[in-house]
Image (cartoon, rainbow, N blue to C red):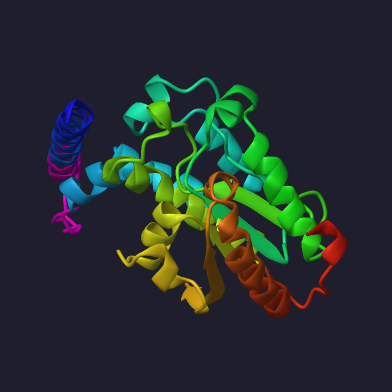
């Protein structure tokens, strides 16, 4: 709110200065000219002030819209748009390749990710790598991995709505740049955010959804499967759907 008020005051000052300058120019024209004033159209000083002193959010949005993947990462590292920036060790933009066969989207960084600045590097991350290997995918060759929020929520709690909204523009820009053939959504939170639905995770599985035209498959989070190994079978079914979507053969030895 303070930033908003500061911008309003700056715009008002610029508008006043522009109007005074125009009035002075108009008076000089009348004084030095023997002929009638050419009658220039009076400018819209308020609109011009808006251009000269844009809202910080509008400016950030314009920067993001022009950003490549490296610039998006820089913006995430310096982001202070929500309270998660106050408690993070490192922001975790994501990693992988452009034009990926698959984009994997989780909920948010955990403790290991917060420490390293890299996505899915703990026990659940190693398990995710095994899932990808099972369908001949890899984070270094044909996959991009990221999360809904880019900073760790304290205690690994669910991200708050305002935290999700602060991060969504980064995620959408990443998706637009990566151009994945398909998206694999890990866990309830990620699925609810991307699909704008509150259904139980089991009800969101076994259906190919779409996010902005991109096929999207929902499955359980690797951490949940490590806690309940009975979920391995449904996850394998989901991975087979992904493999079919992106045209990759199965690699049962990597399962």
Image position of 8 (left or right of 125) = left
Which one is nearer the viewer's eye here, 99 or 34? 99
Can residue 182 be seen?
no
Q: Which residue is nearer to you in this view: 47 or 190? A: 190
Q: Quadrant of residue 149?
A: top left
Which quarter of the rendering shows the C terminus? bottom right
Q: Residue at x 53, y 33 (%)?
A: 110
Residue 115, quarter of picture? top right
Horizontal side, residue 86 vs residue 137: left or right:
left
- What quarter of the picture does the N terminus occupy? top left
Q: Is residue 209 above or below residue 11?
A: below
As drawn, 97 above or below 15:
below
Query: Which residue is found at the position 71% from the left and 79% from the top?
Result: 244
Q: Tell me what residue is drawn at x 16 percent, y 34 percent.
A: 8
- State yes or no: residue 42 in magenta: yes
Provide the residue span drawn in magenta.
25-43
Query: Is residue 168 visible in the rendered structure shown here?
Result: yes
221 in relation to 7, above or below: below
Where residue 76 appears, as percent x and y from the top left, is: 51, 36
Total marks shown come to 0
How far across and how far down the image is residue 171, in percent? 50, 52
Q: Is residue 208 left or right of residue 200?
A: right
Tell me where residue 87 sits by quadrant.
Answer: top left
Q: What residue is drawn where x is 33% and y is 32%? A: 82
Locate residue 89, reporting x and y percent.
52, 20
Whether residue 16 appears in magenta in the rendering, the answer is no
User: In this picture, is 25 found above or below 216?
Assistant: above
């Amino acid at each position: 709110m303070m930033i908003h008020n500061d911008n309003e005051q700056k715009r008002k000052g610029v508008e006043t200065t522009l109007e005074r300058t125009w009035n002075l120019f108009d008076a000089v024209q009348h004084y030095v000219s023997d002929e009638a004033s050419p009658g220039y159209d009076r400018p819209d000083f308020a609109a011009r002030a808006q251009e000269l002193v844009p809202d910080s959010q509008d400016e950030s949005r314009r920067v993001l819209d022009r950003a490549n993947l490296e610039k998006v990462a820089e913006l995430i590292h310096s982001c202070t748009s929500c309270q998660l920036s106050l408690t993070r060790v490192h922001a975790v933009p994501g990693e992988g390749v452009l034009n990926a066969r698959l984009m994997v989207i989780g909920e948010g960084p955990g403790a290991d990710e917060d420490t390293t600045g890299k996505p899915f590097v703990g026990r659940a991350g190693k398990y995710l790598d095994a899932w990808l290997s099972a369908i001949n995918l890899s984070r270094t060759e044909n996959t991009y991995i990221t999360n809904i929020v880019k900073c760790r929520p304290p205690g690994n709690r669910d991200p708050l709505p305002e935290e999700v909204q602060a991060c969504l523009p980064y995620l959408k820009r990443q998706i637009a740049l990566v151009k994945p053939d398909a998206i694999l959504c890990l866990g309830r939170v990620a699925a609810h955010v991307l699909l704008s639905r509150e259904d139980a995770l089991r009800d969101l599985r076994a259906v190919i959804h779409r996010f902005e035209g991109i096929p999207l498959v929902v499955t359980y989070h690797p951490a949940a499967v490590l806690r309940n190994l009975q979920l391995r079978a449904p996850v394998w079914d989901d991975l087979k759907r992904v493999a079919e979507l992106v045209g990759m053969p199965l690699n049962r030895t990597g399962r």
